[in-house]
Image: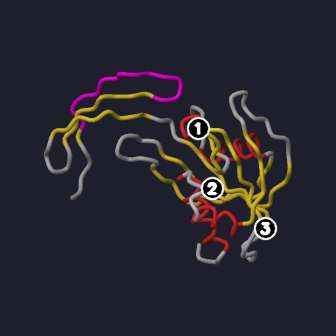
Amino acid sequence: MSGNPKSVSTERVYDGRLLKVDRERFVNPAGKTLEIEMIRHPGAAAVVPVFGSKGDPDPDLIILRQFRYAAGGTVWEIPAGVLEPEESPRHCARRELLEEAGAVAGDLTHLASIFTTPGFTDERIHLFLATELQSAETSHEPDEVIEVETRRLSQLMAMIRDGELVDAKSIVAISLAARFFAGNS
């Protein structure tokens, strides 16, 4: 099965501050005409901030405990944010690292780009690894409630395994960072 879907029609049904919802009709690669509601998102960048070098098997990482209304409370996650118009994912990752975690990266390595939920949104998050960190001041947005903490990589992997860290982008990025530090990049 190959080929791209062919758009038949698009109707904007919601145009919000961050999200847009379109009702789309398209022809899939099997030749069937379908209709879906599609959430349009500008994309985002997320970053795993690490104190340590590739030779360190269990480095310290910065992790955020952030209030998320949709999740019903606080969620452990890595620094992340929405791409501004015309902003590169790398710049967004650096900006969010500074704003949310109060850190500046000497080195920023691209880990992967992932779709969050490709069944109904085009949101793509670009994941980065930040090393050679220097401390700076946070500048949280007025609507953000964030606690900045440090945990060992092994602790975060245990939190993932135990279901305490459930944020998908963070699980993927931390797992990729773990491979990087294990020498399996």
Closest to the observer, 151 or 44: 151
Q: Amino acid at mark 2?
A: Phe
Element class at badge 2: strand
Element class at badge 1: loop
- Dominant SS of magenta comes to strand
**Coordinates of residue 119 in the picture (x, y in percent):** 34, 45
Left or right of 49 on screen, residue 138: right
Q: Is residue 111 magenta?
A: no
Quarter of the image with the C terminus is bottom right
Task: Compare marks 2 and 3 and give the one earlier in the sequence.
Answer: 3
Provide the residue span drawn in magenta. Answer: 7-19
Q: Name which quarter of the figure residue 11 lies in.
A: top left
Q: Which residue is mark 2?
A: 128
Left or right of 99 on screen, residue 12: left
Q: Is residue 16 magenta?
A: yes
Instruction: Please tell me how crowded label 1 is: few (under 14), some (14-19), or many (20+) other residues with Cα within 10 Å.
Output: many
Which residue is at 55% across, 41% downward?
71
Q: Amino acid at mark 3?
A: Gly
**Coordinates of residue 80 in the picture (x, y in percent):** 63, 45
Quarter of the image with the N terminus is bottom left
Which residue is at 62% across, 40% downward?
73
Q: Which residue is mark 3?
A: 52
Left or right of 92 on screen, residue 17: left
Disc 2 from disc 3: Cα separation:
15 Å
Q: Which residue is mark 1?
A: 83
